[in-house]
Amino acid sequence: MADLRGRIVVVTGASSGIGRAAALGKRERLALVSRNDDALDSIAKECVGSGGEALTFSADVADYSAVEEIRGFAVSHFGGIDVWVNRAAVLIFGRFEEVPSPMLHRLVDTSVLRFVPSRP
């Protein structure tokens, strides 16, 4: 695994699951992103307690403009971004032909396109 000490890391989906584990595994300068404010505050406190610096940003990464705001937030506070960890996801259960189009669009927007505005 790469040495990330001193790096600036953005973690989406940081309040639970793999995103939470990714955030807790870092001791860097973190921008933590989630839709769940309470869980986001809790994970930020854990990260700070472990020696990291953590900022929180409440957002839905399916929203393209929100991802642009996250990028701007991290750059303005930390001066840049070294690593972007995309762990926010949407899961849909059911037969493909029975899933409504709006749900499929949300799946693609969140799971595939959300990283596009994070590029420099």
Image: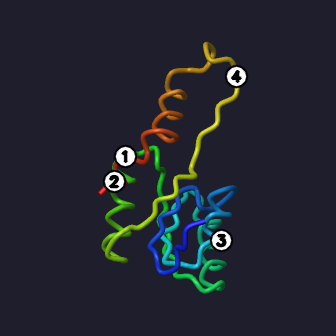
Report the quarter where the N terminus lies.
bottom right
- Answer above or below: position of 65 versus 25: above
Q: Which residue is mark 2?
A: 119
Give the image quarter of residue 44. Answer: bottom right
Q: Under tag 1, what secondary structure? A: helix
Q: Under tag 2, what secondary structure? A: loop
Q: Under tag 3, what secondary structure? A: helix
Would you say the residues marked 4 and 2 are in contact, meaning their CB atoms lie under 8 Å apart?
A: no
Give the image quarter of residue 45. Answer: bottom right
Q: Nearer the viewer, mark 4 or mark 2?
A: 2
Distance Cα–Cα, label 4 vs label 1: 28 Å
**Residue at the image position 65 percent from the left and 71 percent from the top:** 24
**Residue at the image position 51 percent from the left and 62 percent from the top:** 33
Q: Earlier in the sequence, mark 2 or mark 3?
A: 3
Distance Cα–Cα, label 2 vs label 1: 6 Å
Tell me residue 73's x, y (percent): 36, 68
Q: Which residue is mark 1?
A: 116
Would you say the residues marked 2 and 1 are in contact, meaning their CB atoms lie under 8 Å apart?
A: yes
Distance Cα–Cα, label 4 vs label 2: 33 Å
Q: Which residue is mark 4?
A: 94
- Disc 1 crowd, CA 10 A, few/some/many (<14, 14-19, 20+): few
